[in-house]
Amino acid sequence: MKRVVYNGQRIRSALLAMLALAGTGCLQGQNYHRPPVETPADWTHMASVSLAPGASNKVPEADWWQAFHNQELTQFIERALARNHDVRRAVSRVLEGRASVTTAGAGLYPQLNVQGSYTNISISKNTLAGLGLATGEQPRPQVFATPGSSFDLWNGAADLRWELDVWGRIRRGLEAASADAEAIEQDARAIALTLIGDVGQAYFRIRELDEQVEIAQRALTLRRDSLDIITKRASVGLASDLDVKRTEVLVAESAGQIPDLTRLRAVEVHRLEVLTGSTPGSVVLAPAALRKLIVQPEIPMGLPSQLLERRPDILQAEASLVAANARIGQARAYFFPTLSITGQGGLQSVEFANWFTGNSANFSIGPSVTLPIFLGGTNVARLDAAESRYQQMLEGYQQTILLAFREVADLLVSIQARTEQLTRQREQAAAATAAVGLAEVRYRKGLVNYLDVLDAQRTMLAADTQRAQTERARLTDMVSLYKALGGGWHTPGDNPPAPQLGSSAR
């Protein structure tokens, strides 16, 4: 009995020592610190543009598309976030990533399995009792049974295994899995932001085409009226047949533009339907000119350094960098011994009636150590691969930041240029409309020929079309700028808000 107590004390002492070692173990690898990144002080210097006073201090709202003051656009965006299949798939990937984090952290806890069995055993008469012990087998009923005997065996057991994470291999793996899950979430956020931008661009394109159809219909009406006038003047010898034919050509040209513009509009509506998860033909949009629907929002900027905290592609690249850094520590931990506690206990009996009695109990528990000696360079190669992977992620992270700054700067320049261009084109369209009126009056008075009238009309229609195209291009750039800035904020300094995905995304 003293021997049993002594062994029990030794086991308890060994277990306590291993637990203490696990609690004070050396975590391998360096904790992550964000690499230094050069950022410009403001956007004005970087993009060579002049922003409105205070613009650099303004930031987009979480629902930034509300800045366009168009309820129809807002409804399409909200419907797309709730029903778009790419967004739903991204949400499922986020759930998968979170489940992977749970799996990676499971190794920190004891693993316990319970099993029960019934076996009818018959021992060969041509064997020797105890032969199993001589060959190194674990003790079990077959080892001690008499040759030729037959009996039942009732067994219930619990298996325990607990790896003590002394060197931080499991913890670093959990850190890497958590960072990977964060990268997946940021990818889902990027998909949602891209979807919002695509919906906005499709909607603006539809409304631009509505305006172009309106311009084409106005041109058709104008040229039909001109044809009536020219035909009447030609009938009394005040105009030539050539003027009549020229006008007929222009009437046919204007009439031919409308079906093509209608086709392009239908294609964009179909694109909008797919983006919003709707079946083809389910979206009905009454025609409306772009200039009558959209309010041009101000440019909210924030500071360039905030891009590091807002843009999902930057945050995704940094999360991948965090994961790569953690895997370096995980790879280093493989060079050290693995310490585990293993145990087994249960009830075993050859008679069911005695199965749950105290005499049927058996158990074994104790620590184990596995020390890697020679693995053919596996651990060294694993560490080299992890360090190389980190360097790749670092270069990718820094390149993503540079591209983000460039994208915002390009869009700022584009928006400023299109704003100035739009102002001039509006002036051009107003002057061209006035020129048409003057040309028609002078033609009726016989002061100019009909080619001057046609040229004035052509100039006016081209100016109106260019203005509509520039209007849509500027709005598209505004949507792209919001996306380039990382979407919306709640308040400066908060964590970046994820786009609000609809509950039906599950």
Image (spheres, helix red, strand yellow):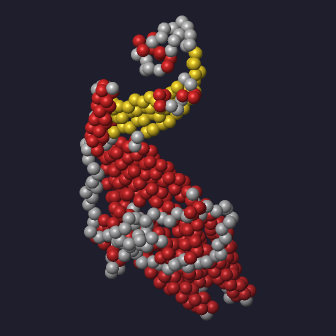
Task: Answer with the quarter of the image where residue 448 lies.
Answer: bottom right
Quarter holding the N terminus is top left
Furthest-top residue in this view? 126
Q: Residue at x 45, y 12 (%)?
A: 130
Image position, residue 72 (x, y; %): 58, 74
Q: Is residue 228 left or right of residue 200?
A: right
Q: Residue at x 59, y 78 (%)?
A: 289
Furthest-right residue in this view? 235
From what the image shows, is residue 76 above or below residue 392? below
Question: Quick one: 405 or 210, which is closer to the camera?
Answer: 405
Q: Residue at x 40, y 46 (%)?
A: 105
Image position, residue 193 (x, y; %): 48, 63
Q: Is residue 1 left or right of residue 212?
A: left
Question: Quick one: 247 or 320, which is closer to the camera?
Answer: 320
Task: Answer with the quarter of the image where residue 415 lies.
Answer: bottom left
Quarter holding the C terminus is bottom right
Q: Residue at x 57, y 28 (%)?
A: 353
From what the image shows, is residue 438 above or below residue 36? below
Count of labels in the image: 0
Image position, residue 100 (x, y; %): 45, 47
Q: Is residue 83 left or right of residue 405?
A: right
Furthest-front residue in this view? 1
Image position, residue 328 (x, y; %): 31, 42
| Residue 385 appears in the figure | no
| Residue 185 appears in the figure | yes
